[in-house]
Image (cartoon, rainbow, N blue to C red):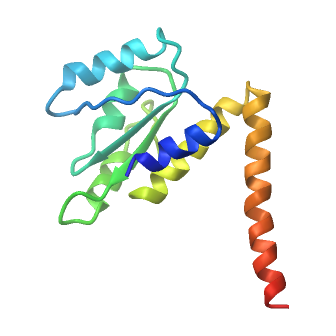
Amino acid sequence: VMEKALSILKKFDIPYTVTVASAHRTPERAAKLSIEAKEKGIKVLICGAGHAAHLAGVIAAHTTLPVLGVPIDSSALQGMDSLLATVQMPPGIPVSTMAIGKPGAYNAGIFAAQILAVSDPVIAEKLSAFKQEMADKVNKKARSFA
């Protein structure tokens, strides 16, 4: 699922680090990763989690960096449990929650790029070109019906 986010980061030449942590099975590791992220120069954190899906919230509780949560469909509830656990954060601990699964991971990559583009004109230009490509595809399809 999270490969979709990585594909976007690669497309925009955004360096990234991938690791695995669990809010429930390795809470100390998750907290440490979050606390150390800013020191390592990381500017945005993307967290994918299934079932109870508290990872993004635990990460957000330990940092001031933007945290993007991707609910993953990994239970009998088809990702709804993950969505609700990710989106329902207490005041003061925001998590930007994406859609469930691959579309959400894809959008997390784009949203991370948009956050970085605020202070990086190269990424901003690549995003503009990307959005223009999407518009061009829609316009081409529309012309085929005219």
Q: Nearer the viewer, residue 6 or 67?
A: 6
In x, y percent, where is residue 21? 25, 30
- Name of the residue lying farthest toward the bottom: 146
Q: Residue at the location (81% across, 73% down)?
A: 139
Q: Quadrant of the C terminus?
A: bottom right
Q: Is residue 118 left or right of residue 38?
A: right
Total count of labels: 0
Question: Looking at the picture, does residue 136 appear above or below residue 69?
Answer: below
Q: Is residue 99 visible?
A: no
76 vs 84, nearest the viewer? 76
Quarter of the rendering containing residue 126: top right
| Residue 9 seen in this snapshot | yes
Q: Position of residue 9 (x, y in %)?
A: 56, 38
Examine the rendered structure and indicate whether residue 10 appears above or below residue 87. Answer: above
Name the residue at 43% across, 17% down.
Answer: 37
Relative depth, front residue between 140 and 45 = 140
Quarter of the figure with residue 31? top left
For this orientation, the residue located farthest to the left is 25
User: Where does the image place residue 40, in percent across and percent down from the top left?
Assistant: 47, 11
Depth check: give the residue in front, 58 or 145: 145
Res 121 → quadrant = top right
In the picture, measured across the screen, residue 3 lies left or right of residue 134, that is: left
Residue 97 on image: x %, y %: 46, 47
- Identify the residue at horizontal 42%, vertical 31% (top origin): 93
In the image, is residue 44 above or below residue 8? above
Q: Is residue 123 above or below residue 34?
A: below
